[in-house]
Structures are given as C-alpha cells and as structure tokens.
Amino acid sequence: MGWEISENGHGLTVNVEGRLVAAVAGNLREEVLGRMSDGTNVLFDLSHMVHIDSSGLGVLVQILQKAKGSGGKVVLAGLQPGPKIVFDITKVSRVFEIVPTVRDAKF
C-alpha cells in the first residue's frame, strides 16, 4: 500500500495504490488530516486501489466528516470493482460522491 498526496487547484489529490487496510490506514488519516484546513477539498484517485477493509473505510469517512464540517468536499474517483463491493455492502457508497475518473470530479 502506498499513496501520494499532491496539491491541485481545488485542494488535495490523494493517489492510493494497493490495499487500504488497518496496517496503513492510520498513517494515511494522519497525513491527509494534517494537510487539510478549512474548506479543503480532497480528491481520492482510487484507480489503483485493489482492496479496502473496514479501517480503510473508516479513514475515508473521517476525512469526509472533517471536509464537510469545514465547508470542503470529498470525491472518490476510479473505484475498482473489488473495493466497490465493500462500499456497496456497507452502504458507505451512499455518503460519498463517486465518479468514474479523476477528470469527472467537479469542485
């Protein structure tokens, strides 16, 4: 599991690769939340994420809560079929804006 965080014209872009699981989820949370300020938008490029567990979902929800609470927005792009099943089963897909590609994200 790895990630890269960069600044874009609307906030942060987080490229996630591999598995977003308990062993690394806390580190991702701390790094993203540490870079967020009021009104920060976060775009997650999940096109290279192959698996997510409940800890990974929890981190994404925490980031969403912080963004929404301060006037920002979170968009998930490129969600692959395997991880999408987890989002759908847990109904977490209902709380996120999910778009097919990074280019489809609107802020």
Image (spheres, rainbow, N blue to C red):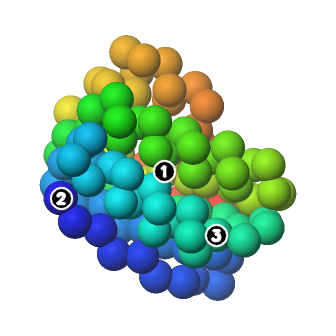
Q: Nearer the viewer, residue 12 or 30?
A: 30
Q: Is residue 103 above or below residue 88?
A: below
Give the image quarter of residue 38: bottom right
Task: State how far apart marks 3 and 1 are (Cα).
Answer: 16 Å
Quarter of the image where the N terminus is located = bottom left
x and y, in percent, of residue 24 in the image = 26, 53
Task: State how far apart marks 2 and 1 are (Cα).
Answer: 17 Å
Q: Amino acid at mark 3?
A: Met
- Of helix, strand and loop, which one carries label 3? loop
Assess disc 3: are there few (<14), some (14-19) or many (≥20) residues with their C-alpha within 10 Å of its C-alpha. some
Closer to the eye: label 2 or 1: 2
x and y, in percent, of residue 97 in the image = 59, 43
Q: Which residue is mark 1?
A: 76
> Of marks 2 and 1, which one's residue comes earlier in the chain?
2
Quarter of the image where the C terminus is located = bottom right
Q: Amino acid at mark 1?
A: Leu
Q: Nearer the viewer, residue 104 or 10?
A: 10
Residue 1 shows which numbered tag?
Answer: 2
Q: Is residue 101 above or below residue 11?
A: above
> Of marks 3 and 1, which one's residue comes earlier in the chain?
3
Residue 67 shows which numbered tag?
Answer: none
Q: Is residue 61 above or below residue 29?
A: above
x and y, in percent, of residue 65 in the image = 67, 43
Residue 44 visible in the snapshot: no
- Of helix, strand and loop, which one carries label 2? loop
Q: Which residue is mark 3?
A: 36
Q: Nearer the viewer, residue 1 or 96?
A: 1
